[in-house]
Image: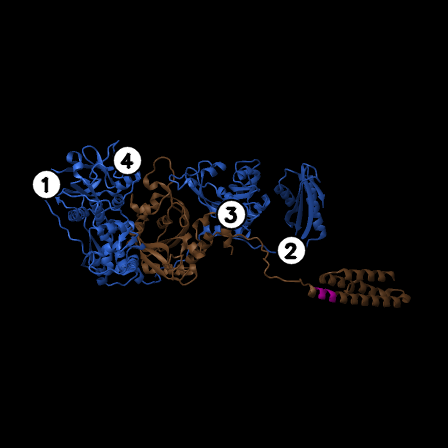
Amino acid sequence: MKFSYNWLNSFFKEDLPAPEILAEKLMMHFFEVEKVEKMGDDHLLDIDILPNRAYDCFCHIGVAREIGAIFDFQIELPDIKIKRNSRKSEDFVNFKIKDKEICSRYTLRIIEGVSVEKKTPKYIKKRLKVCGLQSVNNIVDITNYVMLETGQPLHAFDGEKINGNEIEIRRAKKGEKIETLDGKNYDLDKTMPIIADKKGPIGIAGIKGGSGPEVDESTNLLFIEAANFDPKTIRKASKKLKLRTDASSRFEHGIDPELTVKASDRAVSLIQKHAGGKEAKDFPDSYSKRNEKKVLNLSVEKTNSLLGTSLKITEIESILKRLNFKVERGNDIKVRVPIFRNDIEIEEDLIEEVGRIHGYENIESKSPKVTITSPEINSELFWEDKVREILKEHGYAESYNYSFINEKLKKIFNLDHPVEMENPVSKEHKYLRPTLFPRLLENINKNKDLENSLRIFEIGKIFKGKDKEEKKKLSAVRNDADFRTLKGDIDCVLDGLGIEKVQYTAMNKDDDLWTFEAASVKLKDSYIGKVGRISPQILEKLKIEEEVFAFELDMDKLIEAASDKSQYKKISKFPAAIKDISVLVPENLNYEEFVSVVENAGGELLVDVDLFDLYQGEKISKKKKNFGVRLFFQAEDRTLSKEEINKLLKKIISTVEEKSGWEVRKK
Amino acid sequence: MMDIEKTEKRALLEIRETTSKKELEKIKKRYLGKKGEISEIFKFIPKADPEERAELGKKANRLKAALEKELKKKEAELKKKKKKRRVKSFDPTLPGKRSVSGTLHPITRARKRACKIFREIGFSVVLGPDIESVWYNFDALNFPEEHPARDMQDTLFIKQEGNPPSEERLLMRTHTSPVQIRYMEKNQPPLKIIVPGRVYRNETTDATHEINFYQLEGLMVDKEISVANFRAIITEFVDRFFGKDVEVRLRPSFFPFTEPSFEVDMSCSVCKKKGCSVCSNTGWLEVLGAGMVHPNVLKNAGLNPKNWQGFAFGMGFDRLIMIKYGIDDVRLMYGGDLRFLNQFRY
């Protein structure tokens, strides 16, 4: 919010420090000053007033009070002089608050005989300009000026343009419309607060005035409205109408109801000084809900315990007094809160006041006195990070993608009912991702001209279904591999997690995402993901030409199964004997089936079987394939004799050859 | 005896054709070793015909001498060759041939580093859900209903069927603070936790704003935790995270869930408070928001504020990383561009 340095200075006898120094002080004791800018002979201070202090500090007097507290200066408010005539307010207007929820106080000032002019006193014009407001005419400028000074929005209108001399504050009726001062039209509904005369709405209460009773150079009878409207009602209406004004933003945050008279006094006084006229001898003021006066107890011990200071009671009292609190000493300090400080509700609020005026820079570091507890390891992150390290070792780059996908990706990947945002930032971010693949494949596309070999992975949350369930997934994509390489990468991950074995089952047909060269992965009969080749149709739509192999695994299930209980296996002192065999088998035979036959025949002396050759092609019959495997024989207690090994090998060969369609080619 | 001449021819050929020292050793063993062919010949001599013995002995000795000579010659040759294996020019500035290695995302790296620092000073790492209810994200954290304070965090709501009560409305968490409540509900003080996690805002993206980004939340609750303690802990963290002596300053701020609240700045690690473009010439960088946990928050989580007090803080992790590595656009973090990611290799 914009403030004029000269204006702030005008409340003090003393000279304030230079604008930059003032800004620094405000930042350390009040709020951040985002900008200091010289404007003519004045300076603009742009202060970031946060919502808790909007109530009393969306105005120059509020900020001046803070400055007074920081520097221990007395603040002086301008004099008020009002000239009255002998007419009664009821001769001009009657008003009714029909809905008290909307409006807790309504004050109306009636001034007769004003002369509205384009000319406004220079100092007012200049200060308005620093605060970002254009000059309109003397009356509008003064109402704006008083709003910026006191925080109370004022609305001026031409009393002679009110129909039927009656004003109501109520909610709009269905079908009511209004044209506002800027010539725009709004349809009102039953929730919206309005000011109305006999004919209908003349203003949207607390938000913007209507064009009907607009003040212009012919205006003679001037009404000044100073009201206190309900924050929630204003907030809802302003949101619905998509109409935010200086006034509505103030009402949304709440305003001190005491202000209506104080601010309108100041406005009448200024108007009479610069535009003439006399006020009626009384003014209507309906005040239904007064703020309670608050008295709080502040403990010196608690103050020092929370701040980590050793302030004396006198120091604390002095700070509170500078902030306009009244203090009485008892066991604790009894603190009377000034009416304009609605943010002060509990003892801790007072402690904050003491802390910030004392200065946080004056609170020194102290190591906490605490019970010693040893931190727990977060196993979820522990295993996740282990997986990250493993994939990194295998050449993968880690990517973090948006949690959102767009309509296009939803369509390409044929994703059913992804979780939808009610108010997406843009079309790009309409849905939450139900899989990590769409964005990872986009990563491949983005980097395809950069490197031949792309390996990218992500560990992240995905979101699914009606229950808006969130799950953690591990996905990897690469364009330089085949199925077995990806499976090898999964093996490395599983090794790192201490997971012994998973089962792979061929999918046997293409689906939306995968080609038939893909398998589902199961861990102890529970489905944990898929691995394989991504469908070329999808890749084509993403403009990726190469083959891409990928996997996506359920990270939650992997973490659940992970274990770091690896066991040392004794290394045999005796040499292993190695034999190779080569077996022709039917082309649809799974390697796992083949190996289990070999392993069963080999018994426990056959310690390992390695596939070193897989052949399918012209040299052998069409419906066959060839497995070349290396067999490792070893005992823990002796060197195996040639005879023993040959016997085992013979047994393996004969078992294999018993199977129909299996044939040992090289022994 | 023909055998000896054949052996000599074969042996000499083998020696001459050898290119490695290892192979030469094998040949030497095969012919001149204890069980070598020449030893066998000498063993045979006493058994031979007496007339042939002298001739045989001579031949055998000659063979032995010839092989030894040839072996020596070859040994010398190989030694010389080894010394001689020189490239004509040597350029150590040619690019190294690396084996493939991947990279971890800067957020992962920084998160690990931050968690390690906090673990060492006794904080446990805790996680929480990304989809939250209005209760945990706002109500329980003392945000007044229908209040502009909620506008400080532009919220992304999830489309839901039916009309759930307002506190059960689902949203993408706007901060990691809901985890404070979730953790305090289940655990009794003393509490010392940090919470890293992804958070979401309904904001138009630019170089410093993202629709999703990371926060690191901290919470410490015990009997007598103070602002002074917070200063000590956070100074320790910032010092260790940036690996140098940085100054920390607290200044007043407002958050509904803390009282008092403050903003924490650190002295600019780039210019050392002299003023530069990173700190917009102020010498200071805003790194986190913090405060003493509001009594209402303790109450909402089931703790008695008369018995417990503590501090909480939340930092925009992306920003911290950007300062640390000098990254000028937050969008790079979520763009999957390898030219960016590959810079965080080691």
Q: Is residue A301 magenta?
A: no
Q: Which residue is mark 2?
A: A637
- What is the three-letter code of the residue carrying label 2? Asp
Classify mark 1: residues with Cα within 10 Å, few (<14), some (14-19) or many (20+): some
The residue range painted magenta reads: B75-81
Q: Chain of mark 3?
A: A
Nearer to us: label 4 or label 2: 4
- Which tint is chain B? brown
Residue situated in front as seen by the camera: A124 or A207: A124
Instruction: Please tell me whether mark 2 sits on a helix, a strand or a loop.
Output: loop
Among the two numbered marks 4 and 2 on one chain, the one whose residue lies closer to the N terminus: 4
- Label 2 chain ID: A
Distance in Å between CA atoms under marks 1 and 3 = 80 Å
Q: Cα distance, mark 2 to mark 3?
A: 45 Å
N-terminal label among 1 and 3: 1
Badge nearest the viewer, 1 or 3: 1
Whether labels 2 and 3 share one chain? yes
Which residue corresponds to mark 1? A88
| Pair 4/3: label in front | 4
**Mark 3 Cα shell of 10 Å, populated few (<14), some (14-19), many (≥20):** many
Residue type at tag 1: Lys
Would you place residue A405 above or below residue A606 in this image?
above
Residue at the spot x=32%, y=60% of the render? B228
Q: Which residue is mark 3?
A: A457
Left or right? Give the position of A79 relative to A487.
left
